Image: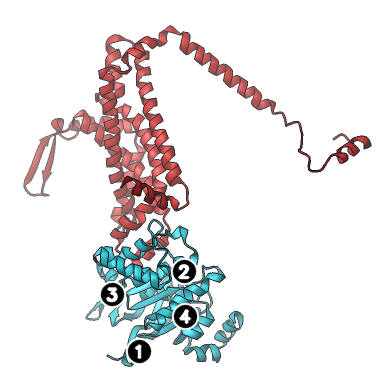
Chain colours: A cyan, B red
């Protein structure tokens, strides 16, 4: 399969996704398609539902209705006839292994070194050989520029370094899709660049990425697609030039005028 | 407030501004009086300890290292260790159960803690010791099917089994609360990060959550251990010859009640002192919120290797 046809194949297909917390509906029918090898940036004011939608993709949140497919597989449910069956934990866990996630607050395991953080899941979940995993983990940490900090604990690393370890940790499971939930929002301004650089490089390798972010410049530069969300709806979707350069909707315009 | 005369004010002004301040400290007469009272009481106690012949310090000295007392001490330590180990295991289960989606498991754990914390451990000990009054035989049977195993309750319930049942079941309820608090102290993001990596709930509990909960769990557990050491003296009522009952066996024969109670108390104090030193060490190591604990653990592991 050539790279070009790959890019046209949808990796994530969401149709009419709804999600409520109690009486509060935070996703009011989201439709989205993410093609393989592309970078999609979700923008929008806080409370617009973009993080919730991201968390639905790897089933950290259960959707209330709609269909969510990743790599052609229905997430969290099994369809038999016209009935949906909730998946067993074992099956959910297997689906998540194909989807890496990076959190706003890094969530590194504080009792493990950077290297152990990266090695934990492949050794524990895939029962891979330790030596093989360590090789790969060192290579990944090297790739995010932390080859010399492998034996440091998270508390001994800066926020930017911690987030880069978190990216390496997610990549160690060799996912098909990477989700980034405001990866630079908890960072001091001078540390944002180093994380975005790692993400940019990752995008260049052809990784499919969905990024919830407030970094408009990153979206402009790296994004293949920008999705603007507000109040649980997708307001506008298009290339960065279309959505950021020439927004059609009033809500997009007003949001961009505030952040640009 | 008195007003200053112009000469006084001038005198203060003349002083070098960066000269050290020489001032009369505030006198606190209340604490001085309290301290004096404490000293008088301490002196009275000390005088009485030394001069009252009824303490019979010679008898105390004669029994401190007697074989009966040392055997009793050994049983007290064994009871404490076995109870704590089993209570930690059972307590961990009880602490994890409320996290289950199954409401029966959640309620069962709460009901257990409610019952075993809500009744005196002394009552529980006597209850287990007299179990045969309630059930003559303990039978293992397939429900409505054949009988697999049958034992006379009286031969099953010895002072040791009754003591361990009473102490473990009670202590597990307290340990469950401590471990539950420890698990609750671990940030939710840790479980989410583990889930997002495809790590199952049980794996992440073992590898991610519990190791971090230790920091919060260990100091109160040390405290519980000290408490348990003394609570084991309750099993003297069901004739298990631990430290207190060993002392009672002797004084019921010799009527040297006070000296033998002092012997037992000295041993409890000695062990508690050792445990307190251990507790202080643990608290310094785990009690702080800072994470270089993990770093220190690494270093200790490296040294031990």
Mark 1 or mark 4, which is nearer the start of the sequence? 1
Nearer to us: label 1 or label 3: 1
Do the numbered discs 4 and 1 sit on residues whose CB atoms are within 8 Å?
A: no
Left or right of B194? Residue B6 is right
Nearer to us: label 2 or label 4: 2
- Alpha carbon distance from label 3 to label 4: 25 Å
Give the quarter of the image for residue A74: bottom left
Q: Of helix, strand and loop, which one carries label 1?
A: helix
Return the mark for residue A104: 2
Q: Residue beneath label 4, please?
A: A42
Mark 3 or mark 1, which is nearer the start of the sequence? 1
Asked if residue B10 can be seen in this view, the reply is: yes
Label 3 Cα neighbours within 10 Å, binned few <14 / some 14-19 / many ≥20 = many
Q: Is residue A124 above or below residue B225?
A: below
Kindly identify which chain the residue marked by label 2 belongs to. Answer: A
Residue A80 percent location from the top left of the image: 22, 78
Q: Nearer the viewer, residue A73 or A244?
A: A244
Kindly identify which chain the residue marked by label 3 belongs to. Answer: A
Kindly identify which chain the residue marked by label 4 belongs to. Answer: A
- Alpha carbon distance from label 3 to label 2: 27 Å
Q: Residue beneath label 1, please?
A: A7
Identify the residue at image location x=52%, y=70%.
A191
Do marks 4 and 1 both belong to one polypeptide chain? Answer: yes
Q: Residue beneath label 3, please?
A: A77
- Alpha carbon distance from label 2 to label 4: 14 Å
Residue A43 percent location from the top left of the image: 50, 80
């Amino acid at each position: 399969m050539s790279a070009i046809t790959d890019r046209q194949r949808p990796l994530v297909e969401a149709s009419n996704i709804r999600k409520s917390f109690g009486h509060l509906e935070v996703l009011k029918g989201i439709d989205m398609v993410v093609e393989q090898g592309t970078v999609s940036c979700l923008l929008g004011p806080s409370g617009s539902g973009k993080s919730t939608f991201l968390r639905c993709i790897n089933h950290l949140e259960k959707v209330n209705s709609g269909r969510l497919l990743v790599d052609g597989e229905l997430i969290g449910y099994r369809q038999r006839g016209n009935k949906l069956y909730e998946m067993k934990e074992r099956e959910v866990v297997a689906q998540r292994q194909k989807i890496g996630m990076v959190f706003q607050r890094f969530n590194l395991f504080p009792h493990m070194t950077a290297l152990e953080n990266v090695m934990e899941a492949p050794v524990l979940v895939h029962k891979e050989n330790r030596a093989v995993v360590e090789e790969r983990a060192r290579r990944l940490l090297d790739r995010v520029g932390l080859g010399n900090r492998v034996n440091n604990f998270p508390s001994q690393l800066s926020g930017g370094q911690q987030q880069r370890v978190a990216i390496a940790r997610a990549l160690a499971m060799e996912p098909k899709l990477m989700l980034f939930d405001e990866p630079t929002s908890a960072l001091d301004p001078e540390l944002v660049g180093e994380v975005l650089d790692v993400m940019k490089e990752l995008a260049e390798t052809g990784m499919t990425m969905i990024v919830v972010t407030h970094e408009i410049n990153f979206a402009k530069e790296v994004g293949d697609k920008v999705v603007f969300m507000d109040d649980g709806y997708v307001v506008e979707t298009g290339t960065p030039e279309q959505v950021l350069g020439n927004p059609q909707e009033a809500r997009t315009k007003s949001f961009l005028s505030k952040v640009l | 407030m008195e007003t200053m005369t112009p000469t006084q004010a001038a005198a203060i002004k003349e002083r070098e501004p960066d000269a050290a301040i020489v001032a009369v400290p505030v006198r606190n007469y209340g604490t001085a009086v309290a301290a004096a009272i404490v000293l008088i009481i301490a002196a009275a106690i000390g005088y009485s300890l030394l001069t009252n012949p009824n303490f019979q310090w010679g008898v105390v000295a004669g029994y401190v290292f007697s074989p009966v007392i040392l055997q009793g001490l050994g049983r007290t330590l064994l009871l404490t260790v076995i109870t704590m180990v089993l209570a930690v295991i059972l307590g961990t289960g009880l602490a994890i159960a409320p996290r289950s989606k199954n409401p029966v498991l959640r309620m069962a754990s709460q009901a257990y803690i409610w019952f075993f914390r809500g009744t005196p451990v002394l009552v529980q000990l006597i209850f287990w010791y007299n179990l045969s009054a309630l059930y003559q035989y303990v039978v293992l049977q397939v429900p409505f099917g054949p009988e697999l195993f049958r034992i006379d309750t009286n031969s099953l319930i010895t002072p040791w089994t009754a003591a361990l049942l009473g102490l473990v079941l009670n202590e597990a309820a307290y340990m469950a609360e401590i471990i539950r608090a420890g698990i609750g102290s671990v940030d939710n993001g840790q479980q989410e990060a583990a889930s997002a990596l495809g790590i199952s709930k049980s794996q992440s509990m073992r590898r991610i959550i519990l190791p971090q909960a230790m920091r919060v769990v260990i100091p109160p557990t040390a405290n519980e251990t000290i408490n348990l050491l003394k609570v084991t003296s309750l099993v003297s009522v069901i004739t298990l010859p631990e430290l207190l009952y060993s002392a009672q066996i002797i004084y019921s024969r010799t009527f040297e009640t006070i000296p033998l109670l002092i012997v037992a108390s000295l041993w409890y104090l000695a062990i508690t002192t050792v445990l307190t030193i251990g507790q202080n060490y643990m608290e310094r190591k785990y009690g702080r919120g800072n994470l270089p604990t993990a770093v220190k653990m690494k270093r200790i592991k490296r040294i031990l290797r």
